Amino acid sequence: MEICPAPADHGILFTRTDVKGTDARLPARWDLVDRSPLCSRLLNAEGVSVSTVEHIMAALSGCGVHNALILIDGPEVPILDGSALPFVRKLINTGLKTLSSPLQAVEVLKTVEIRNGDAFARLEPSDCLEIDFSIDFNEAAIGRQTRSMSLANGAFARELCDSRTFCRQSDVDAMRAQGLALGGTTRNAVVFDGDNVLSPGGLRHKDEPVRHKMLDALGDLALAGAPILGRYVGHKSGHAMTNTLLRALFADENAWQLKSLTAEQQANLPGAGVNLADICAVA
């Protein structure tokens, strides 16, 4: 996979270099998401897809990258260590270019919420992007976790980008019985079994699972096609619910507007001013 520079107003575009004779382009956009509880998968009209885009999308958003061409030679973004840290480190080390074109954001004007049983996802008006997330698992090593934070000024790189995807050993066994996740190991996900953490080295943060859920939420929200000014509140929500929430937002023309940002507003976006020092604590 290669991330290439792109001009202003280009957005994030995936292109499958291994696909010939058909349209291999996949704009990173909410309306192209084939909803799944396990990952965010883009699917175009020709049936070409790229799955597990949430971690690279979170890294791009968290580093303030809004225009990029991503060349990929297969149907899935590499999982690497299960977090966004390898992407963030590479982006910051390579360097970013500030474009002169004014940046627009999706401003949430009124509260939009969706529910599924006791799970819910909600977007509320806010001057900057905030995420408030809670999870509740029976496994003692996970349990109930909550975290709330503003994503302004490099907070993603400092506090969330190294948090890895997680699963239960029972989930791994079930997937492998179906021929899935055969290449997965405890080195690219945190695996829990009751009150035990099976992954070498244990947790990077005692609340790593909820931090990863926030990482996923940022990546899924980045599929709005522009930065979001709003507060995301999620309880037991996941990829499919966040995408359904975006669809509900954009279906209500009174719930949002495109807003040209001032320099001061841009300075409060995720990734504004991010630098290598922001990831030193987790690198």
Image (tube, rainbow, N blue to C red):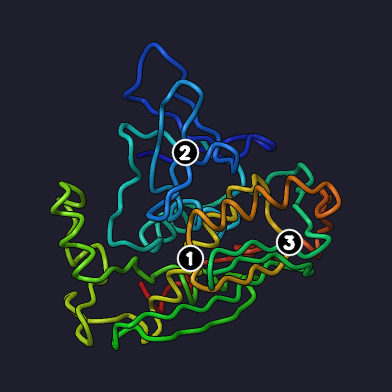
Neighbor class of circle 2 (other Cα within 10 Å; few <14, some 14-19, many 20+) is many
**Which of the two discs, 1 and 3, sits closer to the camera?**
3
Q: Residue at x 44, y 76 (%)?
A: 210
Q: Is there CB contact under 8 Å for labels 2 and 1?
A: no
| Residue that label 3 marks | 112
Quarter location, residue 72: top left
User: Which mark is nearer the camera, 2 or 1?
Assistant: 2
Q: Residue at coordinates 53% horizontally, 62% vertically from top-left? A: 217
Q: Secondary structure at mark 3?
A: strand
Q: Residue at x 28, y 62 (%)?
A: 81
39 on left or right of 25: left
Q: Which mark is residue 157?
A: none
Of residue 231 and residue 38, the one placed in the foreground of this image is 38
Image height of 23 relative to 5, above or below: above
Q: Quadrant of the C terminus?
A: bottom left
Q: Name which of mark 1 and mark 3 comes first in the sequence.
A: 3
Q: Which residue is mark 2?
A: 42
Identify residue type, mark 3: Val
Q: Which residue is mark 1?
A: 215
Give the residue type at disc 2: Leu
Amino acid type, label 1: Leu
Residue 86: where, in percent of width, then height?
35, 59
Nearer to us of marks 2 and 3 is: 3
Q: Element type at marker 2?
A: strand
Seen as rendered, the residue at the extreme front is: 117
